[in-house]
Image (spheres, helix red, strand yellow):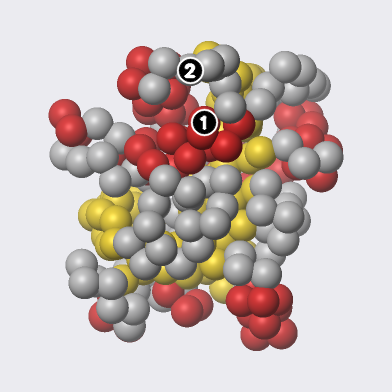
Amino acid sequence: MRKINFGIIQFPGSNCEQDCFHVLSYVLKQNCRYIWHDTKTLKNIDCVIVPGGFSYGDYLRTGAIAAQSNISLRIKEYAEKGGLVLGICNGFQILTELELLPGVLLRNKSLNFICKDVYLKTMNNDSVFTSEYKLNETLKIPIAHAEGNFFVKKSEIKNLKKNNQIIFQYSDDKGLIDDSSNPNGSFMNIAAISNKKGNVMGMMPHPERVSENLLGGLDGKGIFKSIIKNLT
């Protein structure tokens, strides 16, 4: 079975790229390399990971400056041609700034930075990013963000539902989706969405932080295993 070539984007201020690299290279034994933000090509890459962090210090607006970089323009071209792109936390914010995903990520409803474990309900397992999970499966994955409050126009929600683009929603440990299980105020408890084609996904929780038992769980590992399975 051939190994998948992952490219992990590095912006000034990224701080989760090494976590992703470790999971993909050492846990899942795939080919993986860092791609600096000023790079102008994505040659020989099967899947792009846009990791979490504080790209460009979150100045102006989270993800806004990163979206103007050389590599972000290449990511947009890559995605529009069908390439797989996963954006995690700040990566999700960048993908919305690039308009590869609908909606925006606003300041958390509490106006505080939140770092804790949350529960997610799997709303779509018919996805290249989630095929290793069961439909409605509940996962425990940490979040760490100040701007994770997903907002989208009500007129766009119909399309998200119609195209099965809502991938994960915040829930309790039993899978109940309500206000009490919503950590940041996200519309409809949305934690992750994909584009209409299904080749781009953004999620606020950090699957790379729960991909080894040593770190307290394996619930995030299925994201990366799904990608590998669907590319081999």
Front position in the image: 117 or 38 = 117
Q: In the picture provided, is 74 more to the left or to the right than 19?
A: right
Q: In the picture provided, is 163 more to the left or to the right than 181?
A: right
Q: Which residue is mark 2?
A: 30
Is residue 68 among what the camera can see? no
With respect to residue 37, does 227 lie above or below? below
Quarter occupied by the C terminus: top right
Q: Earlier in the sequence, mark 2 or mark 1?
A: 2
The residue depicted at 55 percent of the width and 67 percent of the height is 166
Q: Position of residue 105 (x, y in %)?
A: 55, 63
Disc assigned to residue 219:
none
- Asked if the residue under mark 1 is in contact with the one under mark 2, i.e. CB atoms within 8 Å, the reply is yes
Front position in the image: 114 or 168 = 168
Q: Which residue is mark 1?
A: 228
Distance between mark 2 and mark 1 Cα atoms: 9 Å
Q: Secondary structure at mark 1?
A: helix
With respect to residue 24, does 191 lie above or below? below
